[in-house]
Image: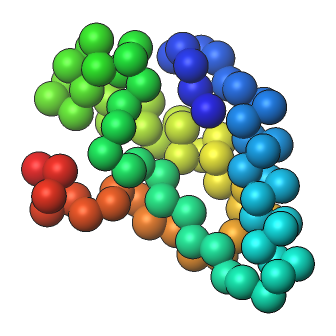
C-alpha cells in the first residue's frame, strides 16, 4: 500500500476494495488489520517501531487506508497480536 514514505499504491488499495466487495457479496463481514507483523523495507531501514518518527507515519497510513476502504469495512484491528510483536 505504501512502497515509499510519500507514495501510495492505488492499485493495491483497489485490490483490497474489490476483496471487501467480494466478501460482502458472499454475506461475510470483513475485519481489516492495519499492521500484521511485516513492515515496508523503507520503514525497516528507519528502525521501524524503535524510531519515534514511525508514530505519525503510521497515523498517516491509517488515515489513508480508512479513507480508501472505510466505506466497505466497519471492523478494524490496529496491530495484530501486539503482545507477540513486542
x, y percent for residue 44: 29, 20
Q: Could you tell me which residue is drawn at 76 percent across and 73 percent down?
A: 23
Q: Could you tell me which residue is drawn at 41 percent across and 59 percent down?
A: 78
Q: Could you tell me which residue is drawn at 64 percent across and 17 percent down?
A: 7
Relative to 63, say whether 7 is above or below: above
Q: Quarter of the image containing the N terminus?
A: top right
Furthest residue toward right: 25
Horizontal relation, residue 44 to residue 86: left or right: right
x, y percent for residue 80: 33, 60
Q: Could you tell me which residue is drawn at 31 percent across and 45 percent down?
A: 37
> Looking at this view, is 66 or 12 the one in front?
12
Residue 9 shows in this picture:
yes
x, y percent for residue 18: 83, 55
> Looking at this view, is 5 or 9 the one in front?
9
Relative to 32, say whether 74 is above or below: below
Horizontal relation, residue 4 to residue 11: left or right: left
x, y percent for residue 42: 40, 14
Residue 57, image quadrant: top left
Relative to 6, say whether 51 is above or below: below
Residue 9, image quadrant: top right
Horizontal relation, residue 18 to residue 82: left or right: right
Furthest residue toward front: 26
Horizontal relation, residue 62 to residue 7: left or right: left
Residue 67 shows in this picture:
no
> Looking at this view, is 84 or 67 the one in front?
84
Amino acid at each position: 500500500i505504501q512502497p515509499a514514505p510519500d507514495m501510495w499504491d492505488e492499485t493495491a488499495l483497489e485490490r483490497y476494495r474489490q476483496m471487501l466487495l467480494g466478501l460482502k457479496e458472499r454475506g461475510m463481514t470483513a475485519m481489516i488489520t492495519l499492521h500484521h507483523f511485516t513492515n515496508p523495507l523503507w520503514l525497516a531501514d528507519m528502525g521501524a517501531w524503535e524510531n519515534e518518527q514511525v508514530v505519525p507515519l503510521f497515523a498517516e497510513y491509517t488515515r489513508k487506508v480508512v479513507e480508501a476502504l472505510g466505506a466497505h469495512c466497519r471492523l478494524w484491528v490496529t496491530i495484530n497480536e501486539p503482545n507477540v510483536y513486542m
